Image (cartoon, grey):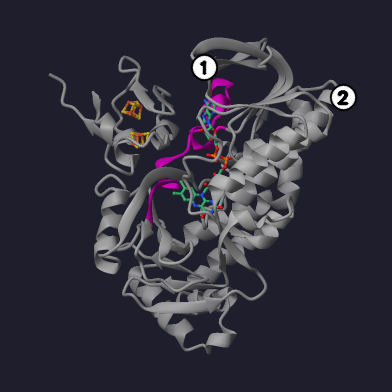
Amino acid sequence: MLKNKYDVVVVGGGPAGSMAAWEAAKGGVSVCMLEKDRDIGYPVRCGEAVGESGLRQFVEIEDSWIAEKITSVKLVSPNLTSVDIDFAAETGYILNRRIFDYDLSRYAANAGAEVYTKAYVKNVLTNNGQTNGVVLDYLGEEKQIQAKIVIGADGLTSRVGRWAGLRTLVRMKDMESAVQYSVSNVDIEPNKMIMYIGMNHAPGGYIWVFPKGKKFANIGIGISGKYSKHKSAQKYLDEFMDREYPDAAILTTMCGGVPCAKPMEKPVANGIMLVGDAAHQINPMTGGGIVAGMKGGWIAGQVAAEAIQNDDYSEKGLLEYPKRMRKDFGKNHERFYKIKEATEKLTSEELDSIAEKVLSIPHDKRTLTSVFKAAVFKKPTLIIDVLKVFAGV
Amino acid sequence: MINIRENRCDYCGVCVSVCPVDCIEVREYSIEIDHPVCIDCDLCVEICPIEVLETHAQE
Ligand SMILES: Cc1cc2nc3c(=O)[nH]c(=O)nc-3n(C[C@H](O)[C@H](O)[C@H](O)COP(=O)(O)OP(=O)(O)OC[C@H]3O[C@@H](n4cnc5c(N)ncnc54)[C@H](O)[C@@H]3O)c2cc1C
Ligand code: SF4
Ligand code: SF4
């Protein structure tokens, strides 16, 4: 039964929330995870693509999570020049997040975390500038829960952080407006993901075709909020579907947003930590946030348990979390953000000629690095931007 | 004033994430705008991927 006091309350039952709850529970403190929806893992607002090595850091990969193994990518430029690139070392997966997210919450529960669904958090409790609990509607009744630490894992809306006084707002240009269809009756190559880039396809983003078994795929689009005013993401996607997959049956339509911003520098304050999308823990170039969010939750859960053992849940005590995060890959995301800004300046013509150039490289020698080299060859100023990134200017 | 064509809404929350005054509330199957707080900046209208929100001229 839901109690009115826990050491740690996690708001949101996505991958970041489950990892945080799991790690905190393993650390021996009392944990409760609150999810507003009826189900953990549903609705799925995600392309579900993930790298094998990323996942393996945290869990043994279960067969039931995998809808498709990915071994190569086809990049399609604005004038439809397409380039196939085999993955060298890395294997990718298209997950069944409905099952995957559910299992992660089970791991958290089996380690001792309490999990509640239909539990909508509508505010935080504070005392002298210290967040110390949440207010929620649970099964139609308003309740208050006291907590030493609240972990906001509430996804892109990140209101828990806002209520606690953190700046979580994302600028329009960094927010991807996204729609995805689950489609059947499409002829697509197995084991290959396709990405369409360029202003005509998806300004400030890309269109993805991720196979999920026979004649089935996730087909979606993200466009930058900078461009979504005049034409919606769905309009771009519908034009694409009419052109490329006119016979597709759309079985599900869902939409969402991807905060492709720089990671938050200080996702903590007194008694509060933010993880996952809520802390903008996303690779800003690809929009991939599953592994990044899991890492955020994983570290935050450990730090939360340590903070409670040490009886210090002040901001100072919790700063250990962003510190470990930065050590891990926070810096990478800042770099990716700068590269994103540099590559955004490439025109459609430049993208087409880069694709042509990469096509002249024999298939077995093509790697993502060779694409990058071709890009630099076509636009030498890009190398300056990239050098700046690595020099940290 | 922002008009919500709610039967189109997917309750995804992207509008919430860009609202500068935090006046939109999205739950599992509901969306509400606190109109007196809204500053009519239209960012929610611009970001909604499936055109649920529209600007309504004030009478
Ligand atoms: C269209 C689209 C495609 C994507 N494709 C990919 C991809 O292919 N690969 C990839 O790695 N990433 C992808 N992403 C990003 C990825 O989905 C997210 O980064 C990831 O889900 C973040 O996990 P999270 O746990 O932080 O948040 P979420 O998974 O969003 O979980 C947040 C949870 O909090 C709950 N919640 C919110 N508010 C409250 C509240 N007030 N009270 C209680 N519960 C609350 C929500 O219901 C939700 O279950 C995509 C995103 C979108 C929108
Ligand atoms: S962005 Fe659009 S679809 Fe998503 S919750 Fe807001 S109004 Fe609904
Ligand atoms: S118009 Fe601006 S202030 Fe009003 S609900 Fe939309 S985003 Fe918020």
Quadrant of the rendered structure where residue A10 is?
Answer: top right
Position in image of residue A354 (x %, y %): 43, 78
Cα–Cα gap, marks 2 and 1? 35 Å
Q: Which residues are magenta?
A: A154-182
The answer to whether residue A152 is left or right of residue A27 is: left
Position in image of residue A32 (x %, y %): 68, 25
Residue at 59% x, 49% y is: A290
Residue at the disc numbered 1: A139
Magenta stretch encompasses residue A178: yes
Residue at 60% x, 43% y is: A101
Callout 2: SS: loop
The circle drawn on residue A368 is: none
The circle drawn on residue A310 is: 2
Amino acid marked by disc 2: Asn
Amino acid marked by disc 1: Leu
Q: Residues within 10 Å of mark 2 (few under 14, many from 20)?
A: few
Is residue A301 visible in the rendered image? The answer is no
Position in image of residue A6 (x %, y %): 73, 18
Label 1 CB sits under 8 Å from any ligand 1 atom: no
Q: Quadrant of the C terminus of chain A?
A: bottom right
| Residue toward you, A196 or B41 | A196
The answer to whether residue A151 is left or right of residue B48 is: right
| Residue toward you, A213 or B35 | A213
